[in-house]
Every structure is written in C-alpha cells, then in structure tokens.
Image (spheres, rainbow, N blue to C red):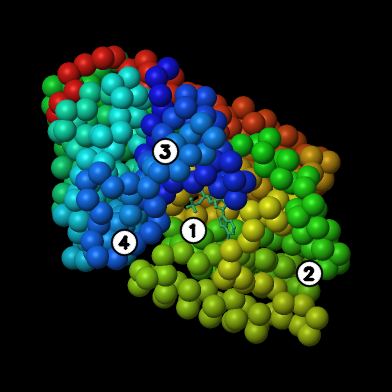
Amino acid sequence: MGRLVVISNRVADPRKTAAGGLAVALGQALEASGGLWFGWSGRIAEGGTPGEGEVNRQQAGPVQLVTVDLCREDHDAYYERHSNGVLWPVFHYRLDLADFDGGSISGYRRVNQLFALKLKALLRPDDLIWVHDYHLIPLAAELRAMGCEQRMGFFLHIPLPPPLMLAALPEHEWLMRSLFAYDLVGLQSEADVTHFARYASDELQARAEGDHGWHAFGKTLQVQAFPIGIDVDEFQALTRQREAQDMHDQLRREYARRRLLVGVERLDYSKGLPQRLKAFRTLLQKYPENQGSATLIQIASPSRESVDAYASLRAELESLSGAINGEHGELDWMPVRYIHRNVARKRLPGLYRAAAVALVTPLRDGMNLVAKEFVAAQDPEDPGVLVLSRFAGAAEQLKEALLVNPYDTARTAEAIQRALQMPLAERQQRHQALLQRIRTHDVHWWRERFLRALQATPAQEKTV
Ligand code: ADP
C-alpha cells in the first residue's frame, strides 16, 4: 500500500488516549505507512484565512499532522452554519431543525476548495486518500478538478437519509453527484446503502454495476456498508485502570441499595433525550417497585452551544429532570442525576460497569459507539443490559440488546423494566453474544475492510 492520507475536520494526535478509539485506529494505519493526517487546526485565524501554502505541521512519531487555521467567517459558514446548521439535521431526518436560509453552501464549498488546494501541494502520486464525514463531502471533486488522480475513499459517519429527505437540500444534486469523484463510499449501515441506491437510481439515473457499483457521469463508484466499531481491547484495558476502577467502586458504594441506569452522550437532539426521560418517568409511575431505587445518571456533555436548537433542548432537559425529581424524589433519593458536563474518557468504563442498564435511545444515529463501549466495559459474570434504539445504526448488529422505538414511551418503559428484572443467565447469554459481535467487528476490522476495498477499486478515468 502507498502512503495513507487521512482528511477529517479535526485532527488528533493518535498517541494520546484522550483521542479515543477512532484516532487510535486510524493512527495505527497512518503509522504503518508513515502517513499524513490533514484537517482544520481548531483555531480561528484573526485577520483572514492564511494563504495557499500556509499550514501548521507537527510530527507524531512517523505520522505527519498537518492543519489549517480558518478565519472566523470561513469557520462560521462552513462548520457552524452549513455542516452543523443544515447537513447534520437533514442527515438525521430533522428537516424541521435545518436552518436552510442560514446555511452557506458557498462557504462550505470555499473551505473544501481551500483544503483541496493546501492538500494537493502535499500529495504524492501513489497516496491512498481517505476522507471522513459530512463536512468534506465535495473534497474529492475539488481535488479531481485540480488534477489529482489518486485513489480516494470517503466514509460517512452519520446516517444517509431517504432520497426525499435529501431532496430537501437545495443543492442535493451537486452534493450527491460530488460523491462520484471518489472510488469508494463507505456508509454505516445497510439501511444507508439502500437509501443511496434509491437516490442514485431515481435522482441521478445511475446504473447498478456488479455487487456494489454505481455507474454515472462516465465512472463507477463502489458503495458499501462498513459499520464502524470500537477498539475493544483498548476499552477493556481502560476498564481495568485505576480511574475507571475508582469510579466504579465509588458508584457501587454510593448506590449499594439502588439500581443504576446510565445514559452518556453529547447533548444533541438526535439522541432522544427528552423521550428517554419521559420513558423513565413512565417506568417510575407504572412500576412503583422502582420508587426509591432506580436512579438514572444522565450525562449530556455540552455540544454546539451556538446553534439555537441546542439551547432549547438544554432548557427542556433541565425542566424535565427537575419535574421528575420533584414528582418522585425523596429526602434521601433523587431519581434523575442530570449532568451537563464532559466525563473524562478514563472514568467512563467505570460508570458503564456500575450500571445495571444503559439507555442508548437515539431518534437517529449513524452507529452509536456508546452502545458498544457499554458492552465492552461489562463484567461477563454479572453484565448490565443494553436498551438500544432500533434507529441507531448499531441496531443492525446488536440484535441481542433490548431494541426499542424511543418514540413509544410506554413500550420503552416496559423494556427498561424488563432489563431491570432480567435473570442473570439471560443477561450473561445476551452479553456474550454482543461482546463476540463487537469484538469480531471492531474498529480494526472496519479500517482494514475499508482500506482493502479502496485498494481493490478498479482504476478508471478520474474526472467527473
Ligand atoms: P456521536 O459521535 O454522535 O457523539 P457516538 O456514540 O458514536 O456519538 O460517539 C460518542 C463518543 O464520545 C464515544 O466514544 C463516547 O464515549 C464519547 N462521549 C459521548 N458523550 C460523552 C460525555 N458526556 N463525556 C465523555 N465522553 C463522551
């Protein structure tokens, strides 16, 4: 294999554990090929985006990290307004929350062009290029327009919605056509692949070719599902470390007489947090034996606070958890502990392991890694139960979880009750099956499968 070049909105130093499983997994492939990781630096440049040749360079072992600063206007248009204000909600089926008028297709395109220009100067002819996520969909088309002929792959970490929802994007044809500049597009789930197939045939008049190919605009694009996994070994090692153990022991002591339920995510409207709190309230009302016992620790870390939809969600959650505590709380017990803060990655496995039940109930999610982390952190002798939304990409794989429709509050409450009551033998059986699945399909399997498929794509005419 030639040198691997990874491009994503943010760049992480793969040697730092805080970077997380994906950075570690990509880091391994980058290290093996002496690769390059390119993206935004996370910094706003005062006085204009730096010119063509200006980049920040850092060496992380054999891996080169190259980043670009953006000026405030470019950053707001490309990242805040278009990626997060338009693409994120539409791709998560929330047309009602997309700010189409506030979006900036020109800013989005301008930054993709700028990335392409700066990256092109660093590329070698036999590089293998792997672009990540919705911020950078048109990057390959920009690189091709500048004459780059390397093999290029793209992985979408979020869901791909059905064609009629995509069609709500004013520039959907341009965006989807630009995918054909890649050789391979990876999606999280088979449902996403079905949506792509329908869009490609109905809107782009593409023709299916072979098992995974789509022919249009004079070239063939391969499209396949590559469900992303976690680094199970790394996460289990983290579970054995002191920070996680301390967290676990502390929670077990504090909640010795109670049953712990846990939810962990960024505060985002795709995660189904109000619906989850309502299901938990129904649980307390319908099954009074949980009164004084079932305690939900809900961690929702701050995220994209400048977007309006997030501020109103935050207010709704504060009011709901206050109402549940007011209705059900006792002097020595509060049913909901809602925490609007980040938890250190090293402590998370202890929190997961102390919980009898995890509530992972997004309204829509590309994959959801918290579900997999929860499984990895459990004690196989006495594992907790995963309650998982059928609308998370992970539901296609994690069939032994208790699958729920998060919009159906009553049935979700029933499933939570079933999880709390589940006999040990059934918990062990389900956990064993889930653990085996996430271990076989871990993040290394994901990376290798994608890169092998990318290298196997047929050589062809590169311009679109
Ligand atoms: P998303 O990418 O939409 O945020 P995922 O579940 O796929 O959702 O991945 C989230 C990652 O971030 C997981 O690795 C999880 O451990 C971590 N994470 C999520 N919420 C928090 C939090 N509140 N504190 C610390 N880590 C978190």
Is residue 456 something one can see in this rendering? yes
Q: Nearer the viewer, mark 1 or mark 2?
A: 1
- Tell me where residue 132 appears, x and y as whole percent: 38, 40
State whether residue 343 is above or below residue 368: below
Task: Name the residue type under label 1.
Answer: Lys
Mark 4 Cα-neighbour bin, 10 Å: few <14, some 14–19, many ≥20: some
In-image side of 357 versus 228 (left or right): right
Residue 412's quadrant in the figure? bottom right
Look at mark 1 in the image and give the residue it sits on: 271
- Foreground pick, 343 / 97: 343
Q: Are marks 3 and 4 in contact (CB under 8 Å)?
A: no
Q: Nearer the viewer, mark 4 or mark 1?
A: 4
Which residue shows up at 62% across the image and 72% down it? 338
Look at mark 2 in the image and give the residue it sits on: 293
Look at mark 4 in the image and give the residue it sits on: 45
Q: Is mark 1 within 8 Å of ligand 1?
A: yes
Task: Name the residue type under label 2.
Answer: Ser
Q: Are marks 2 and 3 in contact (CB under 8 Å)?
A: no
In-image side of 277 versus 425 (left or right): left
Q: Earlier in the sequence, mark 1 or mark 2?
A: 1
Disc marking residue 37: 3
**Disc 4 element:** strand
Task: Name the residue type under label 4.
Answer: Ala
- Foreground pick, 83 / 285: 83
State whether residue 214 is above or below residue 435: above
In-image side of 54 versus 246 (left or right): left
State whether residue 19 is above or below residue 314: above
- Spatial CA distance of label 4 from label 2 is 52 Å
Q: Earlier in the sequence, mark 4 or mark 2?
A: 4
In-image side of 37 versus 29 (left or right): left
Q: Earlier in the sequence, mark 3 or mark 4?
A: 3
